[in-house]
Image (cartoon, rainbow, N blue to C red):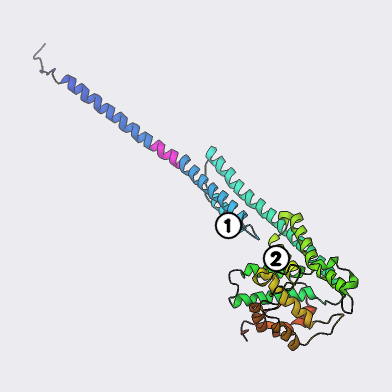
Amino acid sequence: RTVAYAAADISMDEVSSDEAMFFIKMLSLFFGLSIIIMSVVIELVNRGIVIPVNRMAFAAMKFSGTTMIASSMDSEKVNLEKIRNAADRVVDLKISSFDEIGNLYDSLSSMASDTYNFIARVQGQAERIRKMQEVIIMEFAEVVEARDKSTGNHIKKTAAYVEALAEQLKKEGKFADVLTDDFVQKLKRAAPLHDIGKIAVSDLILNKPGKLTDEEFAIMKSHTTEGWKILMKMVKDAGDTIDAEYLNESIDMAHYHHEKWDGSGYPTGIKGEEIPLSARIMAVADVFDALVAERVYKKPFTYEKAMAIITEGAGKHFDPTIVETFTHISEKLYSERTRLDQSGSEASIHLDSNVQKS
């Protein structure tokens, strides 16, 4: 039986506000969970997609830029070390994933390594071609010299003199804006070609034991312009397959090494600093070797007589600055002549570090 009834009075005035508050709390909870989920998803996307893709894109851009810059450098010439480092930066990303991102990374790292290997192979082949061409050119120069029975390793010795003289000029701070280590090496490589135009001169004139007639001397002088033509054609025909920079110096040497400081030389009669530096250096080396060497038309001059002629020619035949430096090393050069006669085609003269100005 019923003993009692329990009852409570509920105010209906607050039901609507309670419903609204409950709805707001549920909505807030929903948005809060949604934000948390979105944050987690965004972080996962960043870690799994955005960051790896950005890293790959940055590494690819660096690799591409480094490859373009390094490949455009002179020299010898592509900087393989920089390209190798750039390729390693791509490979070292070490992105591990089994989806499209991982496949993209694998392809990118493979591309970087393959590109480096390809450039290395191409450079190696290009270097071999350049060396082969240089050997052929030098052999050609020696064949030309062999026709002149009086020169006696003239191209070998003048090349060594040019290198030693250029090194000493550089050491003394002369022509500092031009005489870099690279330029000195170009001079050394170019020097053996300075008389290549003699291929166009008859053996009868080259090896004539007596004095040349005016007509014969005019033909002999043509070896400067003929050498210029030959070397210009070499540069034009070879294009990018050969190092044209040292050949450009050889063109200047061949064309202008008989020009004189006072303008009385040949073939163009230019004077002073109008004459390329390489030709001014060769002029001193060329005449010095001609003076102290035995030729079919003369006995060798003594060192003292040869140097008297050289120093007397300063400011007239030769650049006086170059002659001054030449006097600092000429005795050493003269003493090394016998060794140069017996050495190979890569002969050079190593001057003592304590060579002093006289």
Mark sitting earlier along the chain (1/2): 1
**Residue 82, which numbered label?**
1
Nearer the observer, 68 or 238: 238
| Magenta region, residue range | 40-47
Does 114 sit above or below residue 259?
Answer: above
Q: Is 155 covered by the magenta stretch?
A: no
Q: Left or right: 350 with respect to 230?
A: left
* Kind of residue at disc 2: Glu
Question: Disc 2 marks which residue?
Answer: 249
Q: Residue at x 87, y 71 (%)?
A: 215
Nearer the observer, 269 or 6: 269
Q: Residue at x 62, y 81 (%)?
A: 353
Does 271 sit above or below residue 8?
Answer: below
Q: Is 41 covered by the magenta stretch?
A: yes
Q: Main secondary structure of the magenta part?
A: helix
**Residue 222, which numbered label?**
none
